[in-house]
Amino acid sequence: MSQLSAAERDQWRSSVAAVVARCTPGGNWDALFDLGVAELGLEDLAVAIEECGAVPAATPLLGHMFGLRALRAAPASPERDRLLAGAVSGRHRVALVPADGGRTYVLEGGAADTFVIATGPDLFVVPADARGVVRRPLPTLDPSRVLWHVEFHGAVTTPLGRDGEWKAERLRSELAALVAADSIGGARAVLRGAVDHARQRMQFGRPIGSFQAVKHRLADVSSQLDGAVAAVDHAVRRLDADAPDSALAAAVAKLAAADAYLAAAEGAIQTYGGIGFTWEHPAHIFLKRAHTNGQLAGGAALHLELVADRAGIGSIN
């Protein structure tokens, strides 16, 4: 359940948006963490994630939250509590490593001070500057969201949870919901820009938004986005309540938000016309991020399978 009233949430959204706008040009995000974003429940954290997703720039919050939520999923211990305190302040950056064969791809891996490694039923941490840790940036579809290739060659790790002691399924659902919230922020921003353009751009003496082909496309996207917003709001509330259907709600939210984001980004580029295809316009960044978000925290196939399983339908393959 949200820790804030409706009026306080509106004020919280405005505060986060103002800080994001101020931090984006210089790339110094300490002020964002000074707001206390890491201390809130998922419902209020999702608001901050949405506002970060609305800017076509490299914001560190989503990647840091991946690592921080992994720490929260681990059982209490002196090492876990020490790392969590630093991560909550934002001064000690953590990144989640869903390890696969000793090497993997990590969101915000370049800024991390500590890596949290999830290997099946086990959870470990390792300092980013430890001997044997090698990381390098990767060329990615979305230039504003760089993934890092990380390898661990004999690095000494500290266990935080073994043999199911940590809440692996809960973490997967939380990450899906956070990516969904980021997608909602991006979809809202790119749709708002397209609508403003359709109102102002004149053709044949009329705003292009008055033409059926344009306004129906944008109206369809708006309706789809409304459904995705409802799904994400429901998912974060169920996760905060630790409800038994929270995993299903998170999977539905991830699917709905990813589809709405892609529809909004594609519709925006069509609305902008030629300028939407240029490198200088941010529309292409939103489109690339929509594709990237579709794969973060599990692609559509994974979440469709989860929905089918929880709904009693069986395998969709």
Image (tube, grey):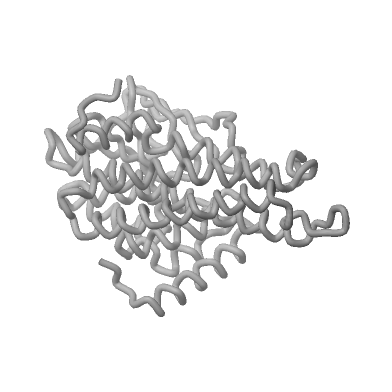
On the image, which quarter does residue 89 sit in? bottom left
Question: To which quarter of the image does residue 196 belong?
Answer: bottom right
Q: Which residue extends farthest bottom? A: 7
**Above-or-below relation of 251 to 48:** above
- Residue 241: % across, % down: 20, 60
Q: Position of residue 34 (x, y in %)?
A: 44, 68
**Nearer to us in this view, 219 or 151:** 219
Up-down relation of residue 70 to residue 82 (above or below):
above
Total tally of numbered discs in the picture? 0
Q: Left or right of 230: which side holds 144?
A: right
Q: Is residue 3 left or right of residue 37?
A: left
| Residue with the most extreme right position | 205
Q: Position of residue 279 (x, y in %)?
A: 75, 40
Placement of 159 over or under 188, stated as above or below: above
**On-image quarter of the C terminus:** top left
Q: Toward the viewer: 253 or 104?
A: 253
The residue that appears at 28% across and 30% down in the rendered structure is 305
Q: Residue at x 36, y 26 (%)?
A: 152
Nearer the observer, 54 or 203: 203
Using the rendered view, name the quadrant where residue 18 is placed: bottom right
